[in-house]
Amino acid sequence: MSIKERIETLREELRKHNYNYYVLDNATISDFEFDMKLKELEKLEEENPQFFDANSPTQRVGGGITKNFETVTHKNRMYSLDNSYSKEDLLDWEKRIQKILGTTEIEYTCELKYDGASINLTYENGQFVKAVTRGDGFQGDDVSTNIKTIKSIPLVMDGDFVSNFEMRGEIILPLDGFEKMNEQRVAEGEEPYRNPRNTASGSLKLQDSAEVAKRPLDCLLYQVVTDERKYSSHAASLEAARNVGFKVPKTMIVAKNIEEVLAFVNEWDEKRHDLPYETDGVVVKVNNLQQQEELGYTSKSPRWAVAYKFKAEQVATILNEITYQVGRTGAITPVANLEPVQLAGTIVKRASLHNADQIEKLDIRINDTVYVEKGGEIIPKIIAVDFSKRPQGSQPTQYATHCPECQTELIRTEGDAKHYCPNTYGCAPQITGRIQHFISRKAMDIDGLGGETVDLLRKEGLIQNYADLYDLRVEQIIPLERMAEKSAQNMIDGIEKSKQIPFEKVLFALGIRFVGETVAKKLAKHFKSIDNLMTADFETLIAVDEIGDKIAESIVEFSNDLGNIQLIDRLKSYGLQLQVSEEDLANQTDKLQGKVFVVSGVFHQMSRNELKKAIENNGGKVSSSISKKTDYVVAGDNMGPSKKTKAEDLGVVIISEEDFIGMIS
């Protein structure tokens, strides 16, 4: 046997043993034998570097250092799930999808909702390529080096499966491993970790992968994303994934109706406490992949899936004080400061009270005994007051009348849920908040600059608005607390690099009230430049698709403010992208202006995402469902039958992929 053949044999053996041990929980050789084979492979690879393989079992031991995690845009967006909390919620969801599909013949899958850190694994030609965190759903951090240390994640496919795909899953820390980690930390005089979920998430961002390798992380997979139409159902794709080495939990079932779904929910609401890892609910999905495609997505969630959340844990504690936070837009949020209490694995000291109406509705008062739960088991909230324990002489809460930061009298206009501080340019938290929003990942994505540093720069008088960032110099930053020359230079480099951020993100970064990411994209595409947008009147703005009165009024108010005009002029002088680039303009036409398209089926010359982008680049609008407003359905192979019927009934024109390409050529 040649050296190359021996190396390949050892790699294959070790992969198989890894799978048996970490996925099947059925070791076929001893730890000693495994270690001996691994050492032999390490030695052979070291002596024969020409046979290096990034996905070799030897690369799992860690040692790679990642100082800055690269931000990567997801090829396919990672959506969040709509939540349900009752049988009625699930039945309502079923009615909605039955109406869209035009049938009651729907099969479901039920999977436990794992409480960990979401991950997207990319494979090409059956080989692991990269791992990216969920991030904001549109983009996340490349944590490939750390992920490769997790033994239950296969790096090379073994068996018949699709070639190019993404695997979605959850990085978790099993409860027994978490307890052992904490035992060791306590023995070493360290503070124990609070809960498995946060510890798993934090592990992915450790710079030293050798440290990650020491942690007993696991990965449970729940979705295959691919353009290859090899499987007709979600369950079949996951079964195939399990067969080639992915750790797909065997708790998943296929349910023929909603009654079987509810039976699964009730079963695991009782049994979940016996699991080796944390779970907070059940994810219900339409099993048929063609039906999934027909149902499509809302702006935030897939219509074909819903998360049923188990009843949240509740605890009682004392409300010590109500304080008020000022957001970047001036919105005031009352905060309950609580007697610290353990809740769902964390110590809770504070909870949001939302607004004055919530305080009045619950009649919350200082020194009350209140019941706290985690909304969606993430954000603590007060759900009720124990009036039987209310102290004598208790006085109703008087909501704040003045800003806690600048003492300006608060306002609340009709239709607003919250009170506001109108001192937009003189209130410190609003100044800091706007700059923090400007530098955030979804906006200008400035490396080397965080929220605390922004506050420090403001307090030191170096910045009062986001345009001031572009006047900063290294020598001004170095004298500041916790600043060294390298970190100061990184900050300046990050600010300089942000000048290449595209117009739509700059527009979002400006922090115009009601102009979120989606609205910013629409406005950038329609007006092409900040000058066109800021000279547009109210009527011009509301004529833009999906731009309503509130957004239009906010843009006009922003555009007429002399301070904002001066800020924009400064940003122009620094070279920020305040108009659509020539390259983007070259790719855009008005050929499909005002036309609404629905895309359905499998395509050959373009992927579905490419086709949708082409529609938008040529002025058209993509919709996920057919209505009287739909102009064309672009139909590929295996178009959903209910969509075809609906299009024919409404007289909507059905065109082929070739027809569409002809329209934009």
Image (tube, helix red, strand yellow):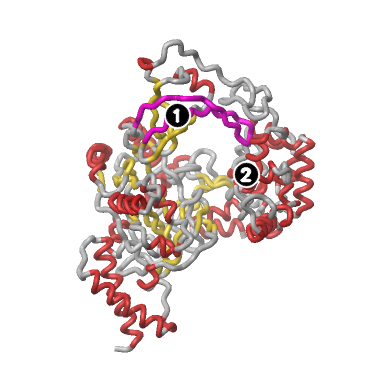
Residue 587 visible at all: no
Q: Quadrant of the C terminus?
A: bottom right
Q: Residue at x 58, y 48 (%)?
A: 442
Q: Which mark is residue 436?
A: 2
Q: Main secondary structure of the magenta part?
A: strand
Say which of 589 and 537 sits in front. Answer: 537
Q: Is residue 249 visible from the viewing direction of this image?
A: yes
Task: Give the image location of residue 187, x and y in percent.
Answer: 34, 52
Q: Residue at x 47, y 25 (%)?
A: 320
Residue in the picture at 74% in, 47% down? 468
Q: Residues within 10 Å of mark 1 (few under 14, many from 20)?
A: many
Mark nearest the camera among 2 and 1 is 1
Which amino acid type corresponds to the residue marked 1 in the rendered image?
Leu
Tell me the quadrant of the picture where the N terminus can be found: bottom left
Q: CA distance from mark 2 to mark 1?
A: 27 Å
Q: Amino acid at mark 2?
A: Gln
- Asked which quadrant contains residue 131, the reply is bottom left
Residue 365 bears which disc, if any? none
Question: Circle 2 sits in a helix, a strand or a loop, which is it?
Answer: helix
- Judge whether residue 409 is colored magenta: no
Residue nearest the observer in this picture, 80 or 115: 115
Crowding near the residue tagged with mark 2, few <14, some 14–19, many ≥20 C-alpha atoms within 10 Å: many
The residue that appears at 35% across and 38% down in the rendered structure is 344
Q: Viewed as shown, does residue 349 lie left or right of 492?
A: left
Is residue 518 left or right of 526 when viewed as pictured? left
Q: Earlier in the sequence, mark 2 or mark 1?
A: 1
- Left or right of 316? Residue 544 is right
Give x and y (percent) for residue 572.
77, 50
Q: Residue beneath label 1, please?
A: 338
Extent of the magenta region: 314-342
